[in-house]
Amino acid sequence: MRLISGPQGGRVVLDGTPVLLLCSNNYLGLADHPAVTEAAAEAALRWGVGAGASRLVSGTMTVHRRLEERLAAFKGTESAVLFGSGYLANVGVLQALASVGAGRTTIYSDALNHASIIDGCRLARAETVVYEHNDVEHLAWTMARRDPDPSAPKIVVTDSVFSMDGDVAPLVELLELCRRTGARLVVDEAHATGCTGPGGRGAVAEAGLEGEVDVVVGTLGKALGSYGAFAAASHEVVELLTNAARPLIFSTAPPPPAIAAALAALELLEAEPERVTALQAGADALRDELHREGFDVAGSTTQIVPLIVGDAALAMRICELAIEDGVFAQAIRPPTVPDGTSRLRLAVMASHTKDELREAARVLGRAALQAGFRPGSGGPVAA
Ligand code: PMP
């Protein structure tokens, strides 16, 4: 792992070299905002560093409850419950929802869902069917073929903004299909919360589906700059999660300073929505600049922009050359992404200026050519 000295800002010192950081999920730069760090420090003094036990064992602290209420309001749901991390939230939500089906539940999962969803399907011990990425027709066909009984418990689960591709799930169509087939819809808004939609309320809000999706998962560890996660849902579903989600029941509650920090970050986000607008404008600018360099950014429409290279060693080489030239964009290889789709995964931050993003695109274009990859050709530079 590479060493960074200092917070995850738009520019960092990486292994001793100053670089533009283009791969952190601290999208809004809130991780070291003074209001957020002060809230964490005050909470440590007031509540202590650790939560002491699972909330079901030693009670819940008011700071956790306050954040849950704010998150439910932010996501337009009746209720919300915190988890230790986004990973644990996905695992817990799927396992708890599937437990209702007493072994009869089928989970339908998008082919490019995050690893924590894949692991959640495993812990749920439900039959899991993978449908083609963002392909609602394929999902409908698969459901009709495998599970025509409308009374059989079914869950459809998808990222909203996909973590390695930056494209967005067809949420309206997915919800419509779920309603028709009696399936519950779980949407992971890890990369959408704070980034996508009006005021950063997420892709679910952007699609006009606030309060309609059965469970919305979000993390506190990305745009909200802290650590921990939440599931937002109806009172009934939150009650089920609280009593059945094993990662919530059998694990210590998130640390009060992290929760207070997320609360402060959420307040900043709501008070200063221009951060979200700046992030979205920066993402648009970066995609334009990369197109100009001839890069294929796949279907990205968000702050996550993949440069698909294909070969893993080539992706690593481009990453190293770009670092030497002052830009850090991490290479992502299998098993995180499918074979043959190694890439540089770029993540814009609200603090990146248009000039910085333009320069980054140039650096990446140069690094690609130097490594022997011609952007846009899908392959090596011709002899
Ligand atoms: N879901 C998605 C789509 C993610 O990308 C991630 C983290 N990379 C998670 C969940 C896990 O969130 P956390 O980092 O809070 O565990």
Image: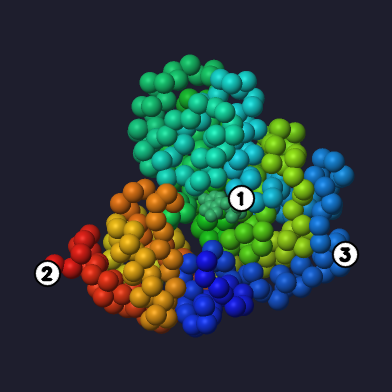
Q: Which residue is mark 1?
A: 86
Does any atom of ligand 1 lie closer than 8 Å to the CB of label 1? yes
The alpha-carbon separation of the residues under discs 2 and 3 comes to 66 Å
Identify the residue shown where x is 62% and y is 38%: 93
Instruction: Indicate the amino acid at tag 3.
Output: Arg
Q: Is residue 214 visible?
A: no
Where's the C terminus, which quadrant? bottom left
Query: Do the residues under discs 2 and 1 have CB atoms within 8 angstroms?
Result: no
Foreground tag (2 vs 1): 2
N-terminal-most mark, 2 or 1: 1
N-terminal-most mark, 2 or 3: 3
Q: Is residue 11 left or right of residue 362?
A: right
Query: How many labels sit on residues?
Result: 3
Q: How far across and down, in percent of the image, does residue 108 sit?
A: 47, 32
The alpha-carbon separation of the residues under discs 2 and 1 comes to 46 Å
Most foreground residue, 144 or 323: 323
Mark 3 crowd level (few <14, some 14–19, many ≥20, 10 Å Cα)? few
Instruction: Indicate the amino acid at tag 2.
Output: Ala
Identify the residue shown where x is 85% and y is 41%: 57
User: What secondary structure is found at the residue carrying circle 3?
Assistant: helix
The alpha-carbon separation of the residues under discs 1 and 3 comes to 26 Å
Q: How far across and down, in percent of the image, does residue 80 sit?
A: 70, 45
User: What secondary structure is found at the residue carrying circle 1?
Assistant: helix
Mark 2 crowd level (few <14, some 14–19, many ≥20, 10 Å Cα)? few
Q: How far across and down, in percent of the image, does residue 7 sit?
A: 62, 75
Q: Which residue is mark 3?
A: 46
Q: Which residue is mark 2?
A: 383
Q: Is residue 128 left or right of residue 125?
A: left
Q: Is residue 276 left or right of residue 336?
A: right
Q: Is residue 194 left or right of residue 339?
A: right
Instruction: Indicate the amino acid at tag 1.
Output: Gly
